[in-house]
Amino acid sequence: MSTKDKPKMYLHKTEAEAKAPIARGYDALFRPSEEYRDSMPDIMDSVELMHGASVPIQQVGVSNFRLPLKYRRLDGSEIELETSVVGTVSLEASLKGINMSRIMRSFYEHKDEAFTLDTIKQVLDKFREKVESLDARVALRFNYPIAQESLRSGLNGYQYYQSALEGRLSKMGVFEKRIVFDFIYSSACPCSAELAEHARDVRNVYSIPHSQRSKARIWVTLAEGADLSLEEIQGHCVNGLKTETQVMVKREDEQAFAELNGAHIKFVEDAARSIFKELNADPRIADFQVACSHLESLHSHDAVSVICKGVEGGHQADFSDFNDLIC
């Protein structure tokens, strides 16, 4: 093919001595002036109709926006953790879209503070002001370390808990504070334990009851004006379930853990009710929901249970994504 027969190109040269029709380059020294910024087009000023149906959107925003945020521990100290942010607002039918970068900038305005549920309220107020939203939601997800002492050897290690601080601000200005907390424990089957003892008693056969790693997820809605630390939620779980998985162990700790499981055998129903008892006794908790999953070593499926406090208009025990509880 001759040169004149070649199709036209826009960004690349077709001959060694020629120039590309469109020059490419990046000016690292360029800094926009206010006048330049004012001249830049904003798609939100477009009068074109939006795509699709002209209806409200209940949630629109950003997910998995990450940055390091500080949190205050129960003892008053602060810890900085990598945080995944979900920030959404509602959108009226008359609006084309939102400026999502404003959501992210709201967090950087508070990046030097220790984040609490009350800090989230400040962020949500800015959401509604800057994005002209009726409703706004924020969820901060992170892994929270709490030191755990071994059962008998005196060793210490850090247990990490998947946690979230959530705030919801309604169009009526009602602010709801929620905490989500994952707790991993061991569950030894009461039925299997009885059958193992029967085999030893009647036939002098040694057998091991089945037990498995299990997970509880707790959703807590706080009473107005109340505060509740993640350490205190972890304490409720330990008091209710007793058999938290261990971080640092020596032989005496492994033996102790076997004894602990034997002392607190439990079905998944027992686990849910045990946590219910702990949370229900805390007046700072207005509403809650608990989902438990026992990852059965006997079966190829899991045993699950969900329970809620039963507050009208509150949690409905409708959780069904049990695969999210695999640990």
Image (spheres, grey):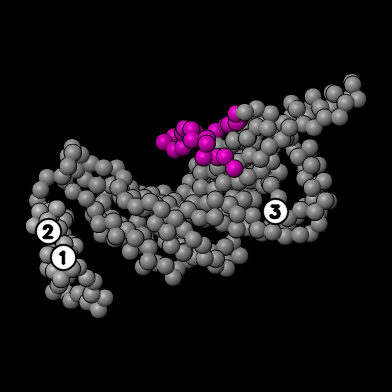
Secondary element at image label 1: loop
Per the image, is 259 magenta?
no
In which quarter of the view is residue 21 placed?
Answer: bottom left
Question: What distance separates the C-alpha of mark 2 from that of mark 3?
Answer: 71 Å
For the residues bearing labels 2 and 1, Cβ distance under 8 angstroms: yes
Residue 22 or residue 98, whichever sits in front: 22
Residue 239 or residue 266, whichever sits in front: 266
Q: Is the magenta stretch mostly helix, strand or loop?
A: loop
Vertical comparison of 295 with 19: above or below:
above
Question: For the residue marked with disc 1, what is the amino acid?
Answer: Glu
Packing grade of label 2 (10 A; few <14, some 14-19, many >=20) is few
Q: Where is residue 303 in the image (x, y as percent from the top left)?
A: 61, 30
Q: Which of marks 2 and 3 is nearer the N terminus?
A: 2
Q: Position of residue 150 (x, y in %)?
A: 75, 55
Q: Residue at x 14, y 58 (%)?
A: 9
Report the mark closest to the observer, 1 or 3. Answer: 1
Q: Check residue 15 in the rendering and tell me which mark sits there, or answer none.
A: 1
Q: Check residue 247 in the rendering and tell me which mark sits there, or answer none.
A: 3
